[in-house]
Image (cartoon, helix red, strand yellow):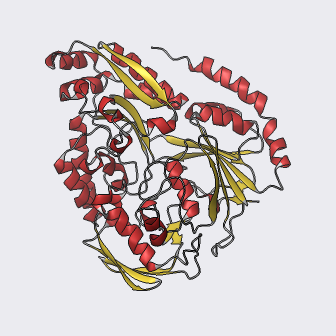
Amino acid sequence: MIFNRRTLLHGMGAAIGAAWVMPRLAQAQGQDTRILRIAAQNDFQSLDPAFSSTVAESDIQDSLFVRLISYDGTSWNTQLDGAAEIEQVDPTHIRFALRPGIAWTNGFGEVSAEDVKYSFERVANPENESPWKGDWEFLDRVDVTNEREGVIVLKQPFSPVWRTTLPWNAGLIVCKAAVEQAGGRFTTEPPAQCGPYLLKEWRPKQRTVLVRNPDWNGPSPDFDEVHIFPIDDRQVAEQGFLAGEFDFINVAPSSLPIYQSNPPQGVTISTRPKVGMEWLGLNTEHPLFADVKVRQAIAHAIDVDAVVDAAYFGGAERATGVIAAGLPGHRESSPYPARDVAAAKALLEEAGVSGFDTRLSIINATDLLTMAQVIQANLSEIGINVEIEPLESGTFWTLGVEESGDTWKDLQMFIHRWGNGPDPSWATKFYTCDGVGQFNWERWCNEEYTKLNSDAMAETDDAKRGEIYERMATLLDESSAYILLTHGVQLLLYREGITPGVTPDGNRLSFSKFKQA
């Protein structure tokens, strides 16, 4: 299959050129509103920190709840959030003291050390099956010493605790009394909030509105309200941005050449290297992909470089492994062989397979569709006919989740896109046995891999951690259940006069840390 970029870019350029006169007018009209308008890539399904699964959910939770520490909004450095003090007193004990006066809504009093204990132990408890339980895998308990003070007790040293556990999803604090009153968990209506913003309105698949929390005693947000619009297709969101409808968006990678050659006025363009992962997943429990030789054949048949180049227009590189550059365990070069159609056909013959029909499920976004089309063309050359199934995000993110129904049983191939944190454990945990039926949709379970993942988190020497991750990478390669594509890049557009509160990879937003001139 041949993809003509020039034709595509020419059409995009004409559309963008017509829209670029709009943003300055829209910005001027909205100067007095102090409303931050965000185009999100998907809508939320749950605002319960223990059970959420998408970046969009995490971004909103960041505004509704507090952590002991949080990222500063522009780097991976952390700062105090709900804590007034916090220190590691020895390898397995972390003492904390909460700021006074952080109030829960609905009359539930102030955030307490008991809330911290409940929140962390709730995530860690394997019976609750939280997607984030791995972040507290080595939590023994939280000891409460008085109303606002306590000690986090670890079973053993835990490398990610300061880099990702405390300042990320697993570190969010919920109100024990409110959650227990709600039955132990909640979804779209938090029973108590305490952050810089409160959830005012949610119209599913249309808009979420956050408003300032009048009782918030931390740094005051610059914006009175945040309006979040879920739009699966980033090129559609891009057109809305250029028409003045949004203040901040993540832009489709296919737009990169246009903005580099003809930047719009009044708009800041920022390219951020991602630490996330994009890959083609194969459900190993589906009859089509139970045989590893079939999975190996698919791996040999796909031209990963062409897949990545078609979607990112040369702006991203093929992944060498699941761990991004700069983190322990990153591989400098790819061990994967070049595309070999003859080898792929031979593997299918060894498996006794002459070809078959299958389905590739994706979120309905232009860049993912482009990836899927290249994969479709590649596999057709070895007799595998691929039907591409574009889905809206809410439907897609339930496909492999067992508690959402039986769709996982017929899930075949899919393209996954995950945003990771600045610790290698975030890149490796998605493939453990613990994640089967939650975020491990491939349903590959290797006990050695799962044990090594725990061992690596307990290792505080980065060189030794790297050696463990090298072995894990080999096991992942041998499964052929995960055809790694790219870490990707994040292209951000935002209005001049706005400083976005985003992580260095541009993937996570902290609405309360957005600033305006």
- Residue 334 figure quarter: top left
Residue 438 vs residue 416, the one in the foreground: 438
Q: Is residue 444 left or right of residue 25?
A: left
Whether residue 246 is visible here, answered yes or no, is yes
Residue 74 seen in render: no
Q: Quarter of the image containing the C terminus?
A: bottom right
Q: Nearer the viewer, residue 515 or 266?
A: 515
> In the figure, 489 relative to 458: above or below?
above
Quadrant where the N terminus lies? Answer: top left
Where is residue 395 drawn, in percent x and y? 47, 36
Spot occupied by residue 349 in the image (x, y as percentages of width and height): 17, 15
- Against 11, residue 318 (above or below) is below
Taking the spot 37% from the left edge, 80% from the top edge, the residue there is 151
Say left or right for 89 vs 255: left
Q: Residue at x 53, y 47 (%)?
A: 44
Furthest-bottom residue in view?
Answer: 146
**Where residue 85 sits in the image (x, y, percent)?**
49, 81
